[in-house]
Image: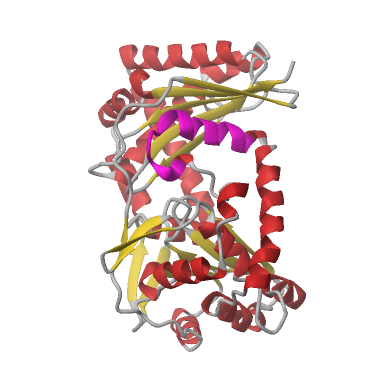
C-alpha cells in the first residue's frame, strides 16, 4: 500500500491497486461521518469509442441512463431504497467525464450498507421492461433541467464556446436520443467502461486503512477484460463559436455568465488553477473593491461564483452572477480585468489573497465528503489534491500576471445571459 503524506496539513492518503486493477484510496479522518464514493471514468462525452479497433457510437445520455439503471436489482428491489432503509444517505451523479456512486453515514451503519453498495455497482440488471420504464422518469428529469436557469446558462455557454467537443451536449441527452437506448446498448457501454482499471473507490472517515481495503477487496468481483477501449473525440479549434448567447425564462433576476475558452495543455495544472483562484478573488471576490462598489450600487446582491473545468479534452473558466443590469456588470468586470493587466497586481494584495485562499483550502479538509469528492475527481485528472498545498509556495505575482494575460483573453471570451421574459 502506497502512503502519501503532506506534513504541512498533517494529512495522509493510503492507496492500493487491487489485483484486478481497481484503485482504492483511504483518507483517515477522526470524524463522525464516514463517506465512500465509487467513480467510473465514463461520462456524457464518451459516446463514441472503439473496442479492439471497432468503432461504436451510443446515444447521447447513455452514461446518465446507466447511473439510473444500476440501482434496480433482479430481486425486484431498488438499491437506493435499500441503502436509505439501512440508515445511510446514498446518491449518484453523472458528469461530462465521470459517473459516481456514493453514500455517507453518520449513524454507524457503514458496514451494514457496504454489501448492498458493493453489489449493485458490480451486478447490473437490464431488461427490456425496466429500461423502458426508466425512460419516462429520465424524460421528466430532462424537462426539469430545461426549466432550470443555472443549467440553461451553463449549457448555452458550452454551445457558445465549443464547436465539436461533446461537452456542449446535455449530460442527460434529449427525449429523442434516450429513445434509442436499449438493454443491449447499456450492456455494451457497461462492459466497455465499468472496468476495474477505469475505476477508483475513495473512502474518508474514521477507518484503519489496511482493514477497510481488505474489506473492499473481499467484495470486489469485477474482472479485467482483455479488450482495448479507445475513446474517440472530435478535434476542437481554439476559437469560440460565438461571443454572446441569450435565452429568456420565467425568472425574476437575470443570470449572466462570462466564459473564457482555455488551452487544455498546461505545464503545471495545479499551479495554474491556484493562480486563477487568486485572480478571481482579487477581481470580484467578496473583499474586492469592485464587488463592494457593485454591491453598494445594488448591481450585485451576492458575490459571483468561479467555475474552472479542465480535462484531457476541454478547459474553460466561468464567472456566474445575478443582476438586473447584467451588461453594466459585465462591462465593469471587463474593465477591471484590463486595468489589472495594465497596472499589475500589488504585492501586498497578492500576499494577502494567497494567505486567505491557503486557509480556505486547509479548512476544506475538515469535511469527509469534500475530501473524498476532491480525491475522486482529481484522480481522473492524474492530480493528487495534497499537491495543491505544495504548489502554493510556487505561485508568484509574476506568474499570476502571466496567467491573467493568457487565460483572460478577450478573443476567447463568451457571454451567456438568461434574462426575464417580458
Identity of the residue furthest to the bottom in this view:
218
Examine the rendered structure and indicate whether residue 143 appears above or below residue 95. Answer: above
Q: Residue at x 60, y 16 (%)?
A: 326
Start and end of the magenta stretch?
A: 150-167
The answer to whether residue 18 is seen in the rendering is yes
Q: Residue 191 lies in what quarter of the image?
A: bottom left
Residue 40 is left or right of residue 402, and the answer is right
Examine the rendered structure and indicate whether residue 393 appears above or below residue 240. Answer: below
Name the image quarter holding the C terminus: top right
**Residue 158, horizontal then vertical, whole percent:** 47, 34
**Residue 36, horizontal then vertical, whole percent:** 55, 69
Identity of the residue furthest to the left in this view:
267
- Residue 158 among magenta residues: yes
Q: Residue 231 lies in what quarter of the image?
A: bottom left
Name the image quarter holding the N terminus: bottom left
Q: Residue at x 66, y 73 (%)?
A: 72
Residue 327 is left or right of residue 83, and the answer is left
- Camera-side residue: 1 or 360? 1
- Residue 52 among magenta residues: no
- Look at the image and name its color scheme: secondary structure
Q: Residue at x 40, y 26 (%)?
A: 241
Residue 290 is left or right of residue 42, and the answer is right
**Residue 310, horizontal then vertical, whole percent:** 38, 44
Examine the rendered structure and indicate whether residue 288 appears above or below residue 155. Answer: above
- Camera-side residue: 351 or 328? 328
Amino acid at each position: 500500500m502506497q502512503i502519501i503524506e503532506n506534513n504541512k496539513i498533517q494529512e495522509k492518503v493510503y492507496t492500493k491497486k487491487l489485483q484486478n486493477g481497481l484503485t482504492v484510496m483511504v483518507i483517515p479522518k477522526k470524524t463522525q461521518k464516514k463517506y465512500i464514493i465509487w467513480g467510473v471514468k465514463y461520462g456524457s462525452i464518451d459516446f463514441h469509442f472503439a473496442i479492439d479497433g471497432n468503432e461504436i457510437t451510443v446515444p447521447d445520455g447513455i452514461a446518465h441512463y446507466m447511473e439510473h439503471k444500476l440501482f434496480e436489482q433482479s430481486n425486484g428491489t431498488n438499491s437506493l431504497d435499500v441503502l436509505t432503509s439501512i440508515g445511510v444517505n446514498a446518491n449518484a451523479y453523472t458528469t461530462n467525464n465521470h459517473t459516481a456512486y456514493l453514500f455517507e453515514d453518520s449513524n454507524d451503519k457503514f458496514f451494514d450498507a457496504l454489501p448492498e453498495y458493493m453489489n449493485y455497482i458490480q451486478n447490473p440488471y437490464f431488461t427490456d421492461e425496466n429500461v423502458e420504464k426508466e425512460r419516462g422518469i429520465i424524460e421528466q428529469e430532462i424537462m426539469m433541467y430545461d426549466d432550470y436557469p443555472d443549467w440553461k446558462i451553463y449549457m448555452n455557454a458550452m454551445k457558445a464556446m465549443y464547436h465539436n467537443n461533446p461537452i456542449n451536449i446535455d449530460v442527460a441527452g434529449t427525449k429523442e436520443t434516450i429513445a434509442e437506448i436499449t438493454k443491449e446498448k447499456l450492456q455494451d457501454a457497461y462492459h466497455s467502461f465499468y472496468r476495474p482499471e477505469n475505476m477508483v473507490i475513495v473512502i474518508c472517515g474514521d477507518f484503519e486503512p489496511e482493514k477497510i481495503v481488505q474489506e473492499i477487496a473481499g467484495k470486489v468481483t469485477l474482472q479485467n477484460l482483455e479488450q482495448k477501449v479507445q475513446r474517440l473525440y472530435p478535434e476542437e479549434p481554439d476559437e469560440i463559436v460565438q461571443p454572446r448567447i441569450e435565452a429568456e425564462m420565467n425568472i425574476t433576476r437575470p443570470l449572466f455568465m462570462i466564459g473564457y475558452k482555455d488551452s487544455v495543455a498546461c505545464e503545471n495544472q495545479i499551479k495554474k488553477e491556484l493562480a486563477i483562484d487568486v485572480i478571481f478573488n482579487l477581481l470580484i471576490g467578496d473583499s474586492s473593491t469592485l464587488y463592494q462598489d457593485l454591491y453598494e450600487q445594488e448591481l450585485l446582491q451576492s458575490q459571483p461564483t468561479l467555475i474552472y473545468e479542465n480535462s484531457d479534452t476541454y478547459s474553460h473558466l466561468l464567472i456566474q452572477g445575478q443582476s438586473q443590469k447584467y451588461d453594466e456588470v459585465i462591462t465593469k468586470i471587463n474593465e477591471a480585468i484590463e486595468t489589472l493587466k495594465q497596472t499589475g497586481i500589488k504585492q501586498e494584495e497578492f500576499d494577502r489573497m494567497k494567505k486567505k485562499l491557503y486557509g480556505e483550502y486547509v479548512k476544506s479538509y475538515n469535511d469527509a465528503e469534500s475530501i473524498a469528492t476532491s480525491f475522486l475527481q482529481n484522480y481522473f485528472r492524474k492530480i493528487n489534491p495534497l499537491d495543491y498545498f505544495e504548489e502554493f509556495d510556487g505561485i508568484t505575482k509574476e506568474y499570476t500576471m502571466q496567467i491573467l494575460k493568457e487565460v483572460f483573453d478577450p478573443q476567447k471570451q463568451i457571454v451567456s445571459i438568461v434574462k426575464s421574459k417580458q
